[in-house]
Image (tube, grey):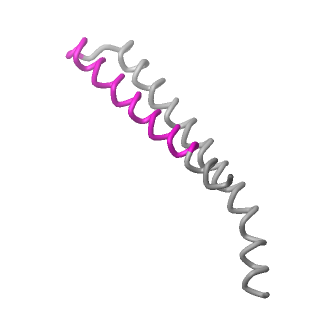
Amino acid sequence: MDAAVILLATGVVLAAELFNTAIEALCDFVETRHNDKIGIIKDVAAAATGVAILAWAIVLTVELMELWPRLAALRAG
């Protein structure tokens, strides 16, 4: 179950990054000149990726905190 949660969180981060890349490419295609609104759209897309990465880091930290005592017990055991 732990590995599945980590894989799911990793998949969400990868999907968010792909969406961010697609949004940025689409914005660059639609508006080649500098546009403040396009910049805001790109910033929001990048922030969404950042939120996904933060959630991934939290999941990974929680899972490692649960795993660490088990590994220590096996080593001592």
Residue 40 position within the rendered picture, expressed as x and y whole percent measured from the top left: 43, 19
Q: Is residue 38 above or below residue 51?
A: above
Q: Is residue 50 above or below residue 61?
A: above
> Is 73 included in the stretch rendered in magenta?
no
Range of magenta residues: 8-33
**Residue drawn at x 68%, y 62% as measured from the top left:** 64
Name the foreground residue: 33 vs 54. Answer: 54
Residue 62 position within the rendered picture, expressed as x and y whole percent measured from the top left: 72, 54
Q: Is residue 44 above or below residue 67?
A: above
Q: Is residue 14 above or below residue 63?
A: above
Name the foreground residue: 46 vs 64. Answer: 64
Name the foreground residue: 12 vs 28. Answer: 12
**Residue drawn at x 36%, y 22% as measured from the top left:** 23
Q: Quadrant of residue 63?
A: bottom right
Main SS class of the magenta portion in the image: helix
**Residue drawn at x 45%, y 40% as measured from the top left:** 14
Q: Quadrant of the C terminus?
A: bottom right
Residue 28 position within the rendered picture, expressed as x and y whole percent measured from the top left: 25, 20
Q: Quadrant of residue 37?
A: top left
> Is 16 included in the stretch rendered in magenta?
yes
Q: How many marks?
A: 0
